[in-house]
Amino acid sequence: MEPNKGLVSALFLSFLLHATMASPTPKPHIKPRPPPHHPCRHLTFYFHDIIFNGKNSKNATAAIVGSPPWGNRTILAGQSHFGNLVVFDDPITLDNNLHSAPVGRAQGFYIYDRKDIFTAWLGFSFVFNSTQHRGSINFAGADPLMNKTRDISIIGGTGDFFMTRGVATLETDAFEGEVYFRLRVDIKLYECW
Amino acid sequence: MEPNKGLVSALFLSFLLHATMASPTPKPHIKPRPPPHHPCRHLTFYFHDIIFNGKNSKNATAAIVGSPPWGNRTILAGQSHFGNLVVFDDPITLDNNLHSAPVGRAQGFYIYDRKDIFTAWLGFSFVFNSTQHRGSINFAGADPLMNKTRDISIIGGTGDFFMTRGVATLETDAFEGEVYFRLRVDIKLYECW
Amino acid sequence: MEPNKGLVSALFLSFLLHATMASPTPKPHIKPRPPPHHPCRHLTFYFHDIIFNGKNSKNATAAIVGSPPWGNRTILAGQSHFGNLVVFDDPITLDNNLHSAPVGRAQGFYIYDRKDIFTAWLGFSFVFNSTQHRGSINFAGADPLMNKTRDISIIGGTGDFFMTRGVATLETDAFEGEVYFRLRVDIKLYECW
């Protein structure tokens, strides 16, 4: 494991700082807010999900492959789609235009997991294979869709994103019926190798 | 990345220790047990799973949404439920009482993945939005249900649990028929930001 | 968190190096290739997947439990199996022989997630319980099957693999019809506790 220069500088500084302190400071009763963290890398993308509805097989990028006993696989189920498992292979673009040249693919699944409000659990990857980016970023976490922004975890990466970790902030940028939606993804990496 | 004081202290100590050693010690033939690790944060919760069986739609917090060819979606399948995919949105409580005020929701899925014994693979989040905790903890791993305790990975977190990692020890605290079970979750975080 | 000696040595070296540099070097315009990383642990295994096809219930280690609207659960669907969710409990062996004594089980799922080419998203664990290894390694990531080698993330571990992270390189070692395949998995751990 090779720490990057930023880490070493931080450690060096903290080391000096630490050396000047006679004893550990006692824990205060009120939890202090942690200092803001600065990402070592920051990227923003959009991705576009078109769910198969029985008629749009040419354009669809996603399909319902699991449903609750009261549902089927061509229409999202009642009760906030609870129990629908959707598999997707969505184009990633740099701007919010579905027809822009894709820079990668968002591949994986989401499962709607609440009966009273739209909420999903996500497991997916951003897969890049262009001159700009090569490799993958892996994501997992809860996505309470009705919140303006939601944070999920970046749990690892490969290639240009080797061993990375971070947080991704999702925002629903557009939503058309129950067939198309577009997500804005703000990727903040806090561990860069 | 900002190392916490504990890390820096540990590094400082190890650094002094290291400086006094003339050469790296040779690897012994018998693998020594690693020193015990101390969590930077330790939390315990319970969560409650009630599987939809066709009759309990009001109380159910989970539903079967995938099954093997020999199964259906209202009764867990034979062969140790192999192939059943269950989606859940379970209340999290501080004690083992289903009717205690929930402090968050456990949301995600499990898949039974062995034919000869009950075992599942879990992907889920603890989602908190109370005065006590805000944010999410993300989990993944194998859950061999018949073992008294099982360890899974904490792969990330957001909000109050920003960038955390750790290990969660699961214990089945109650099991009633094939409809209700309660898990005790011992959360030990070893990376705290 | 206890850093291992390798980390401390690396930090010590980098610290000396850093101390000799008068000022941070300016970022060059062309991104330099990062230095190669050396795993703290390196393991190689094979695992064997036999998909249930309606006739092989005795030997099958995997079953289709979700399918797109145009598919079923005994034959992998058209369009590159897009939408098929497969649950598995596969034997892990040290060599490429299906009949060698298993050293553990590979348990979890994959979902085919592209319409035009074979690609899957994986979430699974290696579960060990032998004299050699005890504990689990958890994996997640995209698996573009048609590439000779593919990298996925190692997102955590338990027991002997407590808190580990790394990268696993997958290689399809054999493929027979649409029923049996064998993967070679090269496990490179870069965070060892």
Image (cartoon, coloured by chain):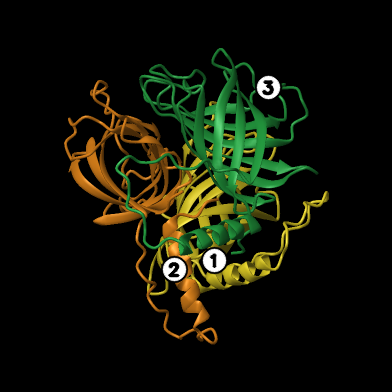
Chain colours: A yellow, B green, C orange
Amino acid type, label 2: Val
Residue occupying the point 31% across, 33% down: C104
Q: What element does badge 3 sit on?
A: loop
Q: Quadrant of residue B33?
A: top left
Residue occupying the point 70% across, 51% down: A147
Q: Which mark is residue A103?
A: 2
Check if mark 2's residue and mark 1's residue have beta carbons within 8 Å: yes
Q: Quadrant of residue A12?
A: bottom right
Q: Is residue C104 above or below residue C182?
A: above
In the rendered structure, the residue with mark 1 lies on which chain? A
Q: Residue furthest top?
A: B177
Q: Which quarter of the rendering shows the C terminus of chain B?
A: bottom right
| Residue B84 image position (x, y, % from top left) | 45, 26
Q: CA distance from mark 2 to mark 3?
A: 45 Å
| Residue A124 image position (x, y, % from top left) | 48, 51
Q: What element does badge 1 sit on?
A: strand
Q: Which mark is residue A45?
A: 1
Amino acid type, label 3: Asn
| Residue A57 image position (x, y, % from top left) | 42, 50
Q: Are marks 1 and 3 on the same chain?
A: no
Instruction: Give the side of residue B67 with respect to residue C57, left or right.
Output: right
Q: Residue furthest right?
A: A29
| Residue C81 image position (x, y, % from top left) | 33, 43
Instruction: Give the side of residue A186 with respect to residue C168, left or right.
Output: right
Q: Which mark is residue B59?
A: 3
